[in-house]
Amino acid sequence: MYHSTDPRAALAATPVGTKPAATHFAGAEYAKFHETPPAENQNGARTWYARGQNFIIAYSEADKGAVLSRTNQPDEYVVLLPDPGAGAEIVWGNDRKVVNGHSISFVPAGASSIMLLGAAKVVRMVTTRSEDLAKLCSNAASYATPHPNLPPFEPWPEATGGPKVRTYSLDVAATPGRFGRIFRCSTFMVNFLEPRNGPRDPSKMSPHHHDDFEQCSLALAGTFVHHLRWPWTTDMAQWREDDHESCGSPSIAVIPPPAIHTSQAVDPKLNVLVDIFCPPRLDFSAKPGWVLNEDDYPMPAQAPAGKSAV
């Protein structure tokens, strides 16, 4: 259920009865980086890790000259420099690229490094195929057994033109009818939502659910209350209490299917939220003009089995 002013109100609903209703549910995952010490403090960077079923979020507060490297990265990953200011030098093979702050980059598999040209926040997003990083996640134990209602991870097609570092500015003006600033690669879809000054209007919330994929909501500024409600089934043992979890920044909330959810910005100052999906969402990709780099990364030849459009 979206408010009439929400661009997502134009998304097609999943046809009723296309798949059996879920009968078992996982809880949400919350990682409040602002309340806990980093998992790593080395090479000039302090890094926190948390995960969903398919993805890992590595949030770093890095000094000038800090280096974040991957020696044997199994697949494409994301480098988000959310704030304006000093950027970074990303090296992959013979590809050496200086990127500005307030940008998003996609780095191919293999050996790579990120050297900060000034003190900055850095968010890396990798799949859980990076087993070395999965072990460092604060909520690693939650995924010792796979969560229900999620199909096996399948990457999307690789970029047109072959592997290289691809970078895009986040300085993109809002357009009526377009939802946020969405970019995708073969492994992730990232929606850098418009910053919100002050609390969200409580009369314009957007409770909705996803049938078969997790949503990661990364708070980079402000405070958000994540409201979640799970379905009732005939088995009361599967019933769950509602969540109304307050998360400051930085933090992540991992929202499981098919929980009804909506996030409420409550800080009186700046609130910044980034929504992350792994792999990319088909319904957002199908909306003309929503994915800003859609010409670089093709969609699958056919819709992945079970992919919902909610």
Image (cartoon, grey):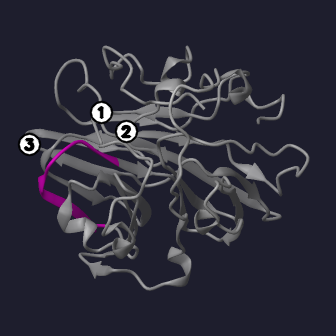
What secondary structure characterizes most of the magenta part? strand
Q: Is residue 268 above or below residue 85?
A: below
Q: Is residue 179 left or right of residue 44?
A: right
What element does badge 2 sit on? loop
Q: Amino acid at mark 2?
A: Pro
Between marks 3 and 2 in the image, the one whose residue lies nearer the viewer? 2
Q: Is residue 233 left or right of residue 140?
A: right
Residue 77 forms part of the magenta stretch? yes
What element does badge 1 sit on? loop
Between marks 1 and 2 in the image, the one whose residue lies nearer the viewer? 2
Residue 279 is labelled as: 2
Q: Position of residue 189 (x, y in %)?
A: 43, 38
Q: Is residue 203 visible?
A: yes
Give the residues drawn in magenta, as a range: 65-78
Q: Which mark sits nearer the N-terminus, 1 or 2? A: 1
Comparing 270 with 214, the one in front is 214
Q: Amino acid at mark 3?
A: Gly
- Contact, mark 1 vs mark 2 (Cβ under 8 Å): yes
Comparing 55 with 26, the one in front is 26
Q: Position of residue 54 (x, y in %)?
A: 34, 51
